Image: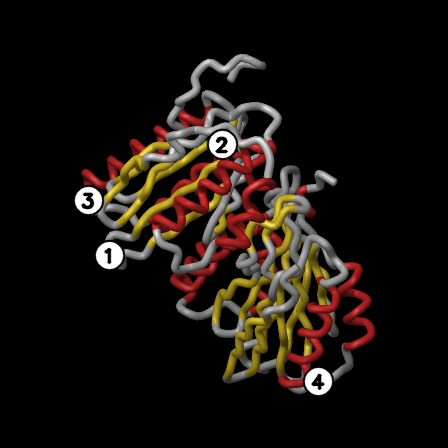
Amino acid sequence: MPSPFSINGGACVAMVGKDCVAIACDLRLGLQALTVSNNFPKIFQYGDHVFLGLTGLATDVTTVSDLFRYKVNMYRLREERHIAPRTFANLVSSSLYERRFGPWFVSPVVAGLEPKTGKPFICGFDSIGCIDFAKDFIVSGTATDQLFGMCESLWEPDLGPDELFETISQALLNAVDRDALSGWGAHVYIIEKDKVTKRLLKGRQD
Amino acid sequence: MRGPTILKATDDKTRQLNDHTLLAFSGEPGDTVQFAEYIQANSQLYSMRNESELSPSALAHFVRGELASSLRSRNPYSVNLLLGGVDPITNKPSLYWLDYLASLAKVPYAAHGYAQYYCLSLLDKHHNPNISLEEGLRLLKLCSDELKRRLPIDFKGLAVKAVTKDGIKAMPFDEDDKVVRDT
């Protein structure tokens, strides 16, 4: 049980749709079975169309999200442009591998739209930065098994923004209800070319 | 406490960071006071240099940064913290929960250690966002009674301090100190 990845609990999922992507996370922060907070978001924005989801050890979720805020701000100042999702994914990968023999205990998920083409981009990582590119969905956190099951059965290609919202929400909500360490509400982001919609789902509070 | 012996029954486990922010701590004896006073000194240094005070949110994130860098050092601090304060500009009160891993959460009410298991359920049931100081003290009495009732060892009661927009003051609390036996 004392795996750093499952002390605090939490879940995150990203999905590709037609000219849009979605990323969602739960809101629980716990200490083993005890829930400490039900308002601990795990998705962070690093540009107009670049999002990072972080599950794992809560302290590293905060440290790593702060670290990337610093790195992305420095990138923007040096390059005088926003970072692209694929570039950001490579930044995440190399930053995690820097800590190869004492890793951050996080499982990151990147979701976004490519700046010029507007093509959806999602990928996931292990804690030492190995990238997992996917053209359907990426899951992470203590509810990965449940999320894989939900996504495999609900996801289909070329979902529009509204259908994608329904699909990702149902996948996350029903996955975390079968995991004791995740849940207590959710944040869902739907990312389109000229619009990002953030929705708060209440979810089961028990 | 040293093994089964109580060395002091009225140890104040809080440090005042500035006029309207209070830090309460528990954990490894030695680490706790050392870390809390380090934070206290740096907060006071900031107040003197800039003639303005850090907000509770700013202090909480500063404390987290220090604790997080300590976590991955040769000998990390084992300190659990609660940081309560009133923002000097907006007059909004806030409470931050930090554990020794430097997990930070902004919460409406919190506890550390065994008190979490005994008190959080009481607080879930009776707390509301607009609770007054008097109601709050009454709720704290419920928590203190529950701890007296359920903890196998006498924990020597609580020291209560109130942080308001006018400052921090120690509150009279549970002075009759009756033995709580049963529900």
Q: CA distance from mark 3 to mark 4?
A: 54 Å
Q: Which mark, by number, is residue B89?
A: 1
The quadrant of the rendering that contains the C terminus of chain A is bottom right
Nearer the camera: disc 1 or disc 3: 1
- Residue with the mark numbered 2: B79
A104, B86: nearer the viewer? B86
B129, B18: nearer the viewer? B129
Residue A100 placement (x, y as % from top left): 65, 42
Q: Are marks 1 and 3 in contact (CB under 8 Å)?
A: no
Q: Chain of mark 3?
A: B
Nearer the camera: disc 2 or disc 3: 2
- Residue with the mark numbered 4: A159
Q: Quadrant of residue A42?
A: bottom right
Q: Which element type, helix, strand or loop, lies under badge 2?
A: strand
Q: Amino acid at mark 2?
A: Val
Going by the picture, which residue comes out furthest to the left? B51
Q: Amino acid at mark 3?
A: Asn
The crowding category of the residue bearing disc 4, from other C-alpha atoms within 10 Å (few below 14, some 14 to 19, many at least 20), is some
Q: Chain of mark 4?
A: A
Q: CA distance from mark 2 to mark 3?
A: 28 Å
The residue sitting at 34% across, 38% down in the picture is B161
**Labels 3 and 4 share a subunit:** no
Q: CA distance from mark 2 to mark 4?
A: 48 Å
Left or right, B98 with respect to B170, comes to right
The residue sitting at 24% across, 35% down in the picture is B45
Q: Amino acid at mark 1?
A: Ile
Q: Chain of mark 2?
A: B
A77, B154: nearer the viewer? B154
The residue sitting at 53% across, 45% down in the picture is B103
- Residue with the mark numbered 3: B50
Q: Which element type, helix, strand or loop, lies under badge 4?
A: loop
Q: Evaluate whether residue B47 shows in this view.
A: yes
